[in-house]
């Protein structure tokens, strides 16, 4: 038995959806442990592109159980729309294979309105939130004011909690944010309708996972975003509102840390970031635009162009350390096919000093200058390679150099968006 966590090792958007889709073949349960519909996983199955925001990508595999854990915040409207679209396309027909934790928190309409209004008021200091209400929903969770799925399906509890919460939210909306308030009835009726549709998926998912592990089943845990967006360990305040790192897989599902056997960090062969915040290797000229166009670097959720830069070994070494990575899945190596030379950030300098570790102080991080090593590109299409030996020598050398710099084995190399465009060097479930 092996239980595997897949975690983003950069600022998110590393290609976790494809890697989870590949590893799902070897798992029995696929479990989402944090975040909300502020993230999107883009999958290419055959010639079809599928974007999922909440439902684990394991849903595309017959016979797999998909679980959304207590660490997730759920927008019922988005969840129901995803189910409807999957059923229309024939990719999801059995409701029993999809479970929602009864303890997950529900995103309400006032969360989204507050999120958008706050960001608009922030001006130049904005975080770059998607405006999906994720942060305000987590605020209510930590403030012990949240509405959980178990509350939503009980109309009396839901009515009481909604009335109590609306008094505060409407005061905030009207008096601080200059926004329109909500009425009780407009939210209550809409969300009671959602509750009727969500009820069939609700379960004590922590108990389900415990029983499955006792029966010898294999679990695959997937998160959203990436290590540098973790609310505790990322580039705060330019982070998301949840624990994106490997530890979040335990708190977000109710599974013990002793039950985790492998932790795979997903990293692009370069780096991207969406939203504001420091980004030492960012390329703002034609090289960055070339990476963006080659890699189709536009957000799956928002469509926003992603900021692009050279591979940053300092970021990856940090991700290896705080997640306890046992392997790295390197994605989008093919995006570098037409670069004559490629740069690798091996370290930083800050105010003339050479840094050995990623600085935890945001102001210091913003002042970091990358130290580059330049290597030759391979200038050939690698998308047909299906083994490491089939890669050009210079591509192999690049991968091996990254492995040396970050101190963690690379266990998978992606050379294109399709499932079959993948080189597996080690299977974490083996």
Image (spheres, rainbow, N blue to C red):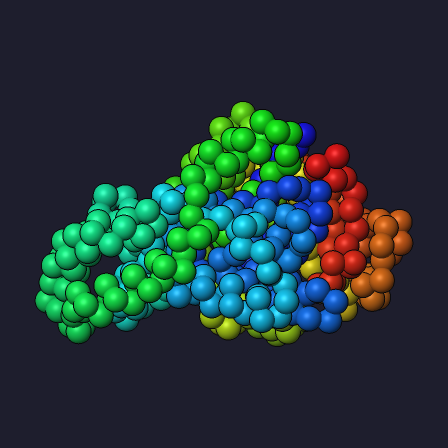
Residue 211 appears in the rendering: yes
Quadrant of the image occupied by residue 340: bottom right
In percent of width and height, residue 196 lies at: 36, 59
In percent of width and height, residue 409 lies at: 71, 38
In the rendered view, tell whether residue 149 sits above or below residue 419: above
In percent of width and height, residue 162 lies at: 19, 56
What is the count of numbered marks?
0
**Residue displayed at 78% across by 46% down:** 424
Q: Is residue 410 left or right of residue 33?
A: right
**Residue displayed at 73% across by 71% down:** 47
Nearest the eye: 140 or 188? 188
Nearest the eye: 371 or 122? 122
Q: Is residue 257 left or right of residue 49?
A: left
Q: Quadrant of the C terminus?
A: top right
Q: Is residue 369 left or right of residue 199?
A: right
Q: Quadrant of the N terminus?
A: top right
**Residue displayed at 58% across by 56% down:** 94
Nearest the eye: 249 or 78? 78
In percent of width and height, residue 368 lies at: 48, 51
In the rendered view, tell whether residue 41 sits above or below residue 227: below
Residue 403 appears in the rendering: no
In the rendered view, tell whether residue 181 sits above or below residue 212: below
């Amino acid at each position: 038995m092996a239980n595997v966590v897949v975690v983003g090792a950069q600022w998110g958007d590393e290609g976790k959806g494809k890697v989870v889709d590949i590893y799902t073949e070897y798992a029995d349960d696929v479990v989402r442990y944090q975040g909300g519909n502020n993230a999107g996983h883009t999958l290419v199955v055959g010639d079809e592109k599928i974007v999922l925001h909440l439902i684990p990508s394991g849903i595309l595999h017959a016979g797999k159980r998909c679980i959304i854990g207590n660490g997730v915040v759920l927008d019922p409207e988005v969840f129901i729309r995803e189910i409807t679209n999957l059923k229309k396309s024939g990719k999801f027909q059995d409701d029993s294979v999809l479970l929602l934790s009864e303890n997950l928190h529900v995103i309400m309409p006032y969360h989204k309105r507050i999120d958008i209004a706050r960001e608009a008021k922030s001006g130049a200091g904005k975080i770059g939130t998607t405006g999906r209400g994720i942060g305000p929903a987590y605020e209510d969770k930590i403030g012990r004011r949240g509405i959980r799925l178990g509350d939503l399906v009980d109309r009396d509890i839901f009515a009481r909690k909604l009335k109590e919460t609306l008094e505060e939210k409407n005061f905030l909306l009207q008096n601080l944010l200059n926004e329109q308030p909500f009425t009780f009835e407009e939210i209550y009726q809409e969300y009671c309708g959602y509750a009727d549709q969500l009820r069939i998926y609700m379960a004590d998912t922590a108990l389900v996972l415990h029983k499955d592990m006792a029966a010898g089943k294999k679990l695959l845990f997937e998160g959203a975003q990436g290590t540098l967006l973790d609310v505790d360990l990322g580039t705060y305040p330019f982070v998301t509102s949840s624990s994106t790192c490997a530890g979040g897989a335990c708190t977000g599902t109710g599974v013990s840390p002793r039950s985790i056997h492998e932790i795979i960090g997903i990293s692009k062969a370069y780096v991207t970031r969406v939203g504001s915040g420091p980004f030492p290797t960012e390329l703002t000229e034609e090289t960055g635009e070339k990476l963006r166009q080659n890699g189709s670097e536009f957000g799956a959720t928002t469509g926003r162009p992603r900021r692009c830069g050279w591979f940053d070994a300092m970021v990856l070494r940090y991700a290896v350390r705080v997640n306890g990575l046992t392997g790295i899945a390197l994605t989008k190596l093919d995006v570098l096919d037409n670069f004559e030379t490629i740069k690798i950030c091996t370290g930083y300098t800050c105010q003339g000093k050479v840094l050995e570790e990623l600085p935890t102080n945001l102001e210091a991080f913003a002042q970091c200058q990358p130290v580059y090593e330049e290597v030759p590109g391979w200038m050939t299409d690698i998308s047909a390679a299906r083994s490491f030996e089939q890669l050009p020598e210079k591509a192999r050398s690049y991968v091996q150099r990254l492995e040396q710099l970050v101190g963690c084995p690379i266990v998978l190399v992606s050379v294109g968006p399709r499932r079959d465009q993948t080189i597996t060097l080690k299977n974490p479930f083996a």
